[in-house]
Amino acid sequence: MTTAGQRKMGVKLVRGPFVRLEPHPEHCTTEESYLELCDRLRKKSGQLLAADLFAGAGGLSHGLEQSGMRVVLAADHDTEALETHRHHFGGLMVDWDLGDPRVVEKVAHLVKKGGVDVLAGGPPCQPFSKAGRSGIRHRVRQGLREPIDQRRDLWRSFLEVVRLAGPSAVIMENVPDMALDREIFILRTMVLELEQMGYAVEERIVDTWRYGVPQFRQRLILVALRDRQVFEWPAETEKKVTVSNAISDLPPVAGGWRPAGGAEGWAEYDGPVTEFQKAMRRQVDPDAHKKVYDHITRPVREDDAVAFELLGSNMRYSELPDELKRYRDDIFDDKYKRLDGDDLSRTITAHIAKDGYWYIHPVQNRTLTIREAARLQTFPDHFRFAGPPSAAFRQIGNAVPPRLGAVIGAGIQEALGRGQRADFTSEELAASLAAWFQATEHLFLPWLKAENRWQVLMAERLLDRAPTTSINSLWPLLQRWKSPRDVADHQEELLMMGGWIGREGRASAVGQIATALTGRGEPPLDDATVRQLATERLVTEAEADLASLVVPEGAADDGEEPVLVTKGVLRVAARFVGETIDRRNRKTDGRLAVARMIGYGFASRQAHLALIELASDICGPTEPACDRCPLSRACSSSPVTMDAAGSSV
């Protein structure tokens, strides 16, 4: 419990320093000066020009410039971030509302007229109601355009800039949660629209440490190349840059320490030791080689200093003595976290601007300094942040790690140099799968073509993974029962059928579901009811998803369309793309691979059912029947190779 005495223990408030930054020498204030800069850069260096929307302080911008590009246009809506970006990058930096259609058209005009090659950004993506999803899905499938709706969906603004400007390459970064939604709705929509614009699209959940970022941080990265050019993900590394590799050269400081000189003050610096540290110091001015700026942090309360002293890198907040706890340890069991110098940092987020307790120095009893947080995000030491310390921390936490941006930028330039065209789009692959599914009369899982959702739930519970002979003998009998009432009236026959195949328990469970539904007046098995059955554990999540997938809600085929990631479907996807997604990051990489194979057009639902059938009958765990598979000409694991024209999948 927190005592009154503990609550009074505080620290002296320390404000500032407030960093103010002058604009870059090539900063532009008008469209004319922006176009002049673009023209001069193209003629002088031949560098690819880039625009960074939702740019923040410029983590992605800096990475793209490190890869050899020049960022000439950027937009954001954060005052301090705007000042930071204007200081470090030339070109036009604007504080415009990208939710306004007129602004979208203006930005697209600048991108196109300036000859911008690469459009990058991390638009925030908000959830949608079921009705909203249905409407967007319909418009996309019909080829109708409504770039921005009343909720100011900034991801649609981003796509509309792409449509109007047609850059050679597109980079979109976002949080991994974007790929964890049941339908992966926004991402599948974006991929479909980009493919319809003529782009080849790749997306992946990236572990940034595999590209030299010293923290556990995942980002969703989408790369789209015009004219269906293929992007290949840069090679990863298994070698980690640890916290100590990144920050051990920075001098010790006490919590709350501030150098003399305010914003221009510095801490004495002895020099870098590791390769990472040397890279961080590479662009520091020669007269500042013995200086490190922004190496300041919050003061430390007396009770926190005692807690920090006891805290090891493997110790949780809940393990501290009760007298040192200021928060409930049943809710905040990891409220304090000392970083392990020999491992990666936890993800640096904007939360660091609030208290820093998640980021306690590996050795010193204080939270991280601005410079240490910047290092862990791979911002080099010459990079400074406008505003007070809280604004600097916020900008750092919200940023894309520059090292990740540099790797992606280099990969794009290599891909554009190769000019290799993709063999097929997601939409084309889905159409091929759907056509095969429709033409197959005798399915291994015949309930994938059931008339109603009750038949799917019933058959999936009783016959899932049953031998072919059992399925062939029982499915015709089960088909007679088109409603829970039919089953409730024939419980004895159902149990007898279950006994024939040694599944009396499963048959009894089907009867219990039927009894529960009839007791409720047999409500229609719409999406909401099916999900409720899963919540009550009368059916499993997988059974509920399959029922929604097999039989759409309504004749317009606008019901939920979840992405199923069963073991079998993941196996098919892993073989198709030639990667171990069925064993690594199944909930992210695996779901993304499945989503790419089924698309989000008219054929996506039946394409998904085709994958389920393939996993059950053709693409088994051992000795897959590739000669019978509709994917054999495109599959990375098939002995049959795709022809040069890529005319069939």
Image (tube, rainbow, N blue to C red):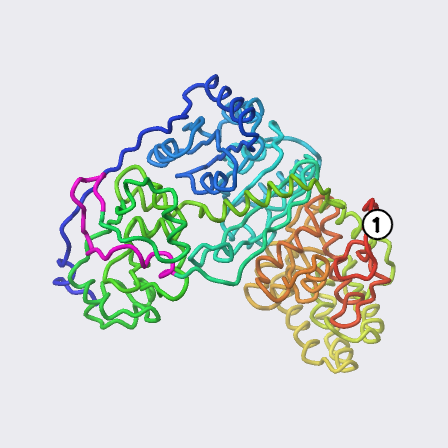
Q: Residue furthest front?
A: 286
Which sits in the foreground, 456 or 600? 600
Q: Is residue 58 above or below residue 573?
A: above
**Residue at the spot 65% in from the left edge and 39% down from the top edge:** 416
The kind of residue tagged 1 is: Asp
Residue 343 is situated, as x and y percent measured from the top left of the image, at: 40, 65
Q: Is residue 538 above or below residue 226?
A: below
Name the chief secondary structure element in magenta: loop
**Residue at the spot 51% in from the left edge and 38% down from the top edge:** 121
Does 111 sit left or right of 645 as displayed?
left
Which sits in the foreground, 266 or 429? 266
> Does residue 643 show up?
yes
Which sits in the foreground, 599 or 558? 599
Is 246 magenta? The answer is: yes
**Based on the displayed image, in which of its 4 quarters is residue 317 positioned?**
bottom left
Q: Which residue is mark 1?
A: 643
Is 174 magenta? The answer is: no
**Based on the displayed image, in which of its 4 quarters is residue 84 positioned?**
top left
Residue 516 is situated, as x and y percent measured from the top left of the image, at: 62, 68
Residue 413 is situated, as x and y percent measured from the top left of the image, at: 60, 40
Q: Would you call the spot at circle 1 few (<14 residues within 10 Å), some (14-19), or many (20 or more)? A: few
Does 519 sit left or right of 18 as displayed?
right
Which sits in the foreground, 367 or 102? 367
Q: Is residue 227 above or below residue 455?
A: above
Quadrant location of the N terminus in the rendered image: bottom left
Q: Which residues are magenta?
A: 243-266
**Residue at the spot 76% in from the left edge and 69% down from the top edge:** 620
